[in-house]
Amino acid sequence: MAGYLIGLMALAALASAFVGIWRARNKRDAAGGAKSHSRPIYHGLNAAIWTGVPAFVFILLWLLFQNSVIDALVIASFPGSDQLSGPQQDLLVSEIRQVASGNIFKEPSPEVLAAVDHLRSLESLATWAMVALVAALVALGAYFGFRAIEHRFRARHSVERSVTWFMMFSSLVAILTTAGIVASLVYEALQFFARVPVTEFLFGLRWEPQIAIRADQVAGQGAFGMIPVLFGTFVISALAMAVAVPTGILSAVYLTEYAGERFRAVVKPLLEILAGIPTIVYGFFAVLTVAPAVRSLGLAIGIDAAPNSALAAGGVMGVMLIPFISSLSDDAFAAVPRAMRDGSYALGATKGETIRKVLLPAALPGIVGGVLLALSRAVGETMIVVMAAGLIAKLTLNPFDSVTTVTVQIVTLLIGDSEFDNPKTLAAFALGLMLFIITLGLNLIALRTVRKYREKY
């Protein structure tokens, strides 16, 4: 119902825009064609904003609190609910909603069936109340929007203020979302560090999080040293960047400075197709083609290579990252003014000297941005590592050996039968927090590097 309601509200706002434009033109003609402060399009936009925005905000707030209020009313009317704890009430609400949706796993009790009927009646009442209130807000907003259409009304200023407030709201949402993610990571990580010493996590050399989470399970005591996991992440990321960075930057240089227009028009789209291939396809390619080839190569040169290796995962990941670096570097080279190239040639520099001493310093911010984007993608990649590198955390520099990464361990820790008050599960949040801090540090280093070495023009 909410989707249909938002669609009807959007149609009402669009209709208000056309009606507002028509009314503004009529008022202008009635005034003898005298020059008004704002064009009719701004009066229409102002009417559309008054019609749609308040109702849309109301719908979002209503949907945000509707289920919580209905659940509280259902629980309050359930017999004996005041004697249940918070988790027990949550389980009861879940059971009532499951029965209401038709997912019945056992015969519900009469009290649950009565609660289901109460839930459905409350949801129906809430839906019709929302429809009535939204319709009233749309009508009231349209009234105020049309009433504001006057010859000297500063409609353009009103629209610009609305757009400014919308941009401020969008920025605030982005900031609050980031703060919420960081706060959740910090909170859960502190819960983990209350059970596992920080020194063991930061400096431990064993990662074996197989710890019992139920009384009937048999498992070890667990070891939560993050050094092997972090080391595997850096090994695979370094191998991927060793493939992607030179190939991406050199291909961008060739396409920008050496290739003809017809060749560039064909090769650049083909190169960017690599960015659209799903990572699962790269994972299949790595495990079925590259990993056996790497193992055969290792055995041929006398190295005991594992079936899953860091070299296979890092090499395929590097191929996946080439379009990110190449495309952004190509755009950075193309943005350098032509006058800088011509000035370098006029002073007697060769094409290679111009590329090294003029283009690369001028395009450094764009190149660093592409490298950082590729590095972030490499650090956060999971599927290729799961399929081609393995799940065993090892402290090794041997590219022919199997390793694991932070993201793979986070996935493995959060799937299956997990409880969020257990060190095994909470370790995922500690790993995520460390990964966030490391990525933030890399970004700060890159920003300082760009400020120090870039050429301003």
Image (tube, rainbow, N blue to C red):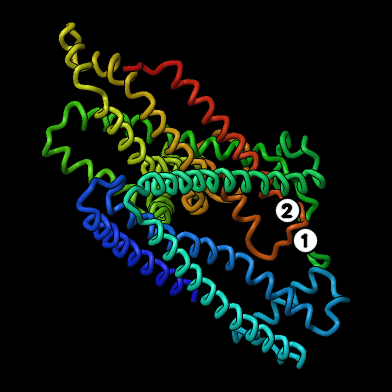
What residue type is disc 2 on? Lys
Task: Between residue 408 and residue 336, name the one nearer to us.
Answer: 336
Q: Residues within 10 Å of mark 2 (few under 14, many from 20)?
A: many
At horizontal 70% and vertical 89% (from top left) the residue drawn is 106
Q: Is residue 300 above or below residue 217?
A: above
Q: Is residue 52 above or below residue 210?
A: below
What residue type is disc 1 on? Ile
Task: Between residue 59 and residue 293, name the one nearer to us.
Answer: 59
Q: Is residue 253 above or below residue 57?
A: above
At horizontal 28% and vertical 45% (from top left) the residue drawn is 272
- Residue 55 x/y as whole percent: 49, 65
Element under disc 2: helix
Element under disc 1: loop
Say left or right for 389 vs 208: left
Check disc 2 and report the residue beneath it: 424
Check disc 1 and report the residue beneath it: 213
- Residue 216 x/y as whole percent: 81, 68
Q: Residues within 10 Å of mark 1 (few under 14, many from 20)?
A: some
Would you say residue 295 is visible in this rendering?
A: no
- In the current view of this chain or complex, which residue is farthest to the top? 347
